[in-house]
Amino acid sequence: MSYRYGAWRGGPDPLEPPFDVAGALDRLGERVLSGDRAADALRNLLRQGMPGTRGLRDLLRQARDRRRELRERGRLDGTLEQVRELLDQAVEQERQALFPDPSDAARLAEAELDQLPPDTARAVRQLADYQWRSPEAAATYEQIRDLLRREVLDSQFRGMRDALAGASPEELQRIRDMVADLNAMLEADARGEDTQGQFEEFMERYGDMFPERPRSLEELVDALARRAAAASRLAASLTPEQRAELAALSQSVLGDLGLQYELDRLGRSLRSRRPDLSWDQGAAMGGEQPLGLGDATTALEELADLESLEASLGQRYPGASLDDIDLEAVERALGRAAVDDVETLRRLERELTEQGYLVREQGELKLSPKAIRRIGAVALRRVFSSLDEGRRGDHDVPGLGLAGEPTGASRPWVFGDEEPLDVVRTVRNAVLRGGAVDSRRHPDPRSATVPLRGAEAREAGFQRARGAEAPGAGSARARRAGRAGGAVALSPEDFEVLETERRTSAAVCLLVDQSYSMLLRETWGMAKATALALHSLVSTRYPQDALEVIGFSLLARTVRPAELPDLDAAVGQGTNLHHALVLAGRHLDRHPEAEPVVLVVTDGEPTAHLEPDGYPIFDYPPDPRTIELTLTEVTRLTRRRATINTFMLDDDPRLVAFVDLIARLNGGRVFAPSPDRLGDYVVSDYLRARRGRRGR
């Protein structure tokens, strides 16, 4: 046997390396950290694509360009114009043959030609029984009949125009048989009968009439229905006069062929099977070149594909998914390369979903907590990359506890300990103490202890202090454990726990201004990235801390971690810092033993407050009551020993004056960072502030 190797031409390379999910997720993160919602960031990624892969935006642009080309291809009344020209030519040829003849018959024939109706269809039908004197005129008239026969059937069955060129009566009869058999098969399928064998026999007899080469009855119905819908759109796109002429010409041709009844049955069946197609919807076509009936139908069929394709490529409807894109329509309209690009984007979406970065909720893809943690980690790395080593600080305090890092030492377990269990030393203690016990002889582990005696006990204790097994006892006990089946009996005195560093805990409130001015000043993206970075820092390095992110505009609300990527600025007016401080106070009350930390990020003075009945009041310039209520909440937090540090993102004099009031009342600090350094300031201040007054 011999083999030949060459370039793969069957689509994407099956041996290509795994998809770069990390790179795709980083691109998603970039958009989220710049202020986009998670769903918008995903749509943007799919629109832009990845390196080496076109996105939906490029494919959509290609589809629109192709649609514009089709609309400018030509006029839809080309067949009517061509029939009119041939009719005028036949009449003129006949007049030239009649003019030299002085007989009364010639004059009567001329009078009959003079009385032809202006309607093309009626004129053609009236000349059907005319006795032509001119052989050239008769041949021209026969061209009209042949043209109509081929164009009308080509508008129903693609490729029929070329197949009917010079068709014999036997070939025309074969077409009649094909349409009748097709209707019989569709009716049998509608009754629920198994038509697979009937379809195979049909394609064996008439497969050469269908260039699409359908592989199933559904594919055949789809091809015929799209063609029939395009023909109905063509008729709807003509003027009423042109539509009436075309209908009359088609009926005369189909009546002569004996196909009118069968094609009417076929049309009704196709409409009932595919009501979703664009039946009877007109289309605006331009251009100067007249199109034949078959070519015009093909153009409208492609146009319908492109219109449907644009909707699925746009992905702007509820529950949109890349699976909605018809790959066969993509290949027909845009080529095989476009199919490869769509499949790559599908693979990207599938990989992100399978690896747990995306979840679909109520038909919409959203970032999972796993993806949020990764994006937050990226934001945190950005912050730390710009911080000096000395500014990071630490917040450990001497002592032993349960929340910090392991120190490497262990101690015996006592009732109430919550430190992690030292499994290795616990099992070693059991082996050194009593060895293995046969569970069949000692079902109760507490009765399975075998005390060591004399020198063996002293040696075991010495080795235990050195952190190793006693050579004699340990190895002997191990051998006995192997003989007993490997079971080790544990006793309460065997357990040891790891000692960990004790760390302070903090109740952290990050108050983020969501007013519309944050978007106008282009500071919202950094504020959102700061919230994600702080959430990542607290959840990974300081899990004992209780972080609450509170967004405030006309009203304030607590933002859950899963909502952070979708956090967006409000369109309405209002900066209700009063309500945000009320929510912050509730969070601090739930954690009375923790160090209270309040961080406020804003670009404007308060312009709204919450009334006792729960309704917000907005006014600009700020109502004195708004300032009074906000400062009252500042005073309450100060009594809770909470430090309020404010990060100003604007230098408006009114904002500066208000922030100075907060600093004098609370003793907190005021920062005026540039938007690109906001995360550095907030994270650094959190690390400093969470040490509290005890660490200063």
Image: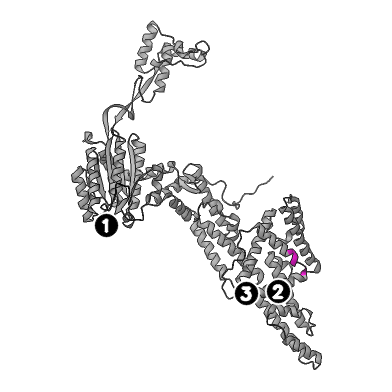
Residue 388 visible in the shown view = no
Q: Nearer the viewer, residue 186 or 177?
A: 186
- Residue found at x 60% / y 70%: 237
Q: Quadrant of the N terminus?
A: top right
Majority secondary structure in the magenta region = helix
Q: Is residue 334 left or right of residue 534?
A: right
3 vs 1, front mark: 1
Which residue corresponds to mark 2? 249
Element under disc 3: helix
Element under disc 1: loop
Q: Is residue 416 left or right of residue 139?
A: left
Label 2 vs 3, first from the N-terminus:
3
- Residue found at x 56% / y 62%: 307
**Residue 470 covered by magenta stretch:** no
The relative height of residue 95 versus residue 222 in the rendered view (above or below) is: below
Residue 79 in the image: state x and y as whole percent: 66, 74
* Range covered by the magenta-colored residues: 257-262
The relative height of residue 503 versus residue 208 in the rendered view (above or below) is: above
Q: Is residue 3 left or right of residue 100?
A: left
Instruction: Check whether the beta carbons of the residues at disc 2 and disc 1 lie within 8 A of each other.
Output: no
The relative height of residue 680 versus residue 186 in the rendered view (above or below) is: above
Label 2 – label 3 distance at C-alpha: 14 Å
Q: Quadrant of the C terminus?
A: top left
Amino acid beneath label 3: Pro
Which residue corresponds to mark 1? 620
Label 3 vs 1, first from the N-terminus:
3
Residue 410 in the image: state x and y as whole percent: 34, 22
Amino acid beneath label 1: Tyr
Amino acid beneath label 2: Leu
